[in-house]
């Protein structure tokens, strides 16, 4: 893990930040295609809103120096279709932070 990534993900006690873990847990991991779907819903009942962990995932990938592409494969461009596609190595790295 590079120094930039450590400053983003690791707390002073040496553990992975809860915010990073929460952001990755909310993502849907597509192992077959090396994609991470970053959109999710938060809230309850009529107080539901769409959210995204895109910034967190992209920040980690940039800090590590991995290449990636973004896209959306939802029928009408919905929030749940946003994804980040990366190499198998980068995908495994993100999955270990979970």
Image: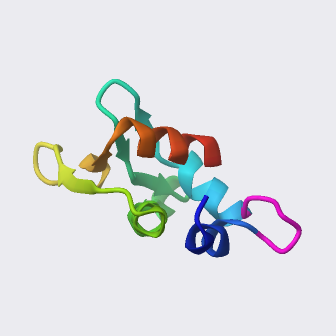
Question: 39 above or below 17?
Answer: above
45 horizontally vs 20: left or right: left
Which quarter of the rendered picture does the C terminus lie within? top right
Residue closest to the eye, 34 or 43: 34
Residue closest to the eye, 21 or 95: 95
31 horizontally vs 82: left or right: right
Among all residues in the image, which is located at the extreme top? Answer: 32
Name the spot of residue 58 as percent of width and height, x first: 39, 64
Please give the name of the residue rendered at 11% of the width and 43% of the height, measured from the top-left corner: 75
Which quarter of the rendered picture does the N terminus lie within? bottom right
Number of marks in picture: 0
Name the spot of residue 13 as percent of width and height, x first: 89, 68
Tell me the magenta residue range: 11-17
Among all residues in the image, which is located at the extreme front? Answer: 2
Name the spot of residue 17 as percent of width and height, x first: 72, 64
Taken as a whole, is the magenta stretch helix, strand or loop? loop
On the question of residue 49 being in view, the answer is no
29 horizontally vs 85: left or right: right
């Amino acid at each position: 893990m590079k120094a930039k990534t450590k400053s983003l993900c690791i707390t002073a006690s040496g553990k992975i930040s809860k915010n990073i873990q929460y952001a990755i847990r909310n993502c849907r991991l597509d192992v077959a295609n090396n994609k991470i779907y970053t959109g999710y819903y938060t809230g309850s009942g009529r107080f539901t809103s769409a959210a995204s962990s895109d910034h967190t995932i992209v920040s980690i990938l940039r800090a590590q120096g991995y290449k990636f592409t973004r896209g959306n494969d939802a029928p009408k461009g919905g929030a749940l279709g946003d994804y980040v596609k990366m190499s198998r190595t980068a995908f495994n790295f993100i999955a270990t932070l979970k």
